Image (cartoon, rainbow, N blue to C red):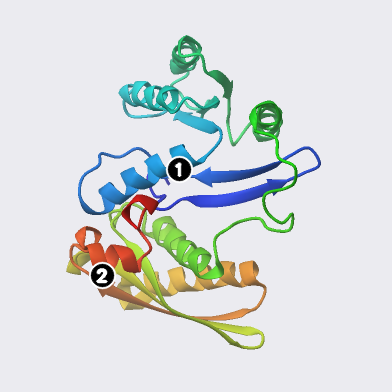
Amino acid sequence: KPQTTRQRVTGVLTNEDFQAIFVDAPGVVRPQAGLNHFLSGEFQSVVEDVDVLFLLLQLDAKSPDVFHELIALAQKSKKPVLGIVTKIDRPEKHRILVLKEMLEKAGIESIKASALKNAPLMKEDVFEWLKKNLPETGAPLVDEEIYTTQNMKQMAAELIREKCFEYLHQEVPFGLAVHILKFDESQPNLTKIHAEIWVSRDSHQGIVIGRGGSSLKRIGSEARRDIEKLIDTKVFLDLHVKVKKNWSKDEQIMKELGYVTPQSL
């Protein structure tokens, strides 16, 4: 879902032509206090750290103003940029030409993409662009067997959070967090995970739990299944919902959740 990325998420692709470390950054937000301040800092940090940028422009964006803002940020980076116009199967097709002209004017190469219709073709275009624009290195930067730099604990938390967004839809605002209390791999063929889902209001706690615990049970069951696929072992997942009022404005809680940018260390 849009605007749900909190921290940079890395994925490593290695093939016979190149190795690329993809970094999914949070979207652009206003640098206010608390969580938004972190998200803004994380975005800026990612832009500074990477060698090239993919600029994802969704055809169904609420306002075209965001296109101007994103293109300006990309130009400011002084790095190779590929503009990817996404969701081209949406009704707002008149924006395709507008975006193409905006990107051309900014000197940014672009491609059109639809995850539903032309994903394989888009992948080929992206790979060709990467081969032309990635800096050369003498050897792969990371082991060829590695596909992400996130650890299992982080990925488990993200899978739980993903299920919350998937099944709760718009009922609970995006001010929801997952805190892993314990990740125990001491037993062979069994991983025990104790986690809390944090919400900022008492009323949201009941929504996450659901009538008779139905929502929480579904979230836990689906998350456990995905975590088992990820780590290839049986998982015991103990989930609880806890109210942490204004957690996204509490510096200590933000650190507990790992929402700390390199600049703030």
Q: Which residue is the extreme one toward the bottom? A: 187
Circle 1 sits on which residue? Answer: 46
Residue in the image at 66% along x and 88% along y: 188
Question: 122 or 135, which lies in front?
Answer: 135
Mark 2 burial class by Cα count in 10 Å: few <14, some 14-19, many 20+: some
- The residues bearing labels 2 and 1 have C-alpha atoms spaced at a distance of 33 Å
Residue in the image at 40% along x and 62% along y: 164
Point out the image quarter for the C terminus. Answer: bottom left
Residue 231: quarter of image: bottom right
Label 2 is placed on what type of residue? Gln
Marker disc for residue 205: 2
Question: 220 or 157, which lies in front?
Answer: 157
Q: Is residue 5 above or below residue 177?
A: above
Mark 2 and mark 1 residues within 8 Å of each other at the beta carbon: no
Q: Position of residue 258 (x, y in %)?
A: 38, 63
Label 1 is placed on what type of residue? Val
Residue 17: quarter of image: top right
Mark 1 burial class by Cα count in 10 Å: few <14, some 14-19, many 20+: some
Question: 52 or 89, which lies in front?
Answer: 52
Q: Is residue 96 above or below residue 126?
A: above
Task: Give SS at disc 2.
Answer: helix
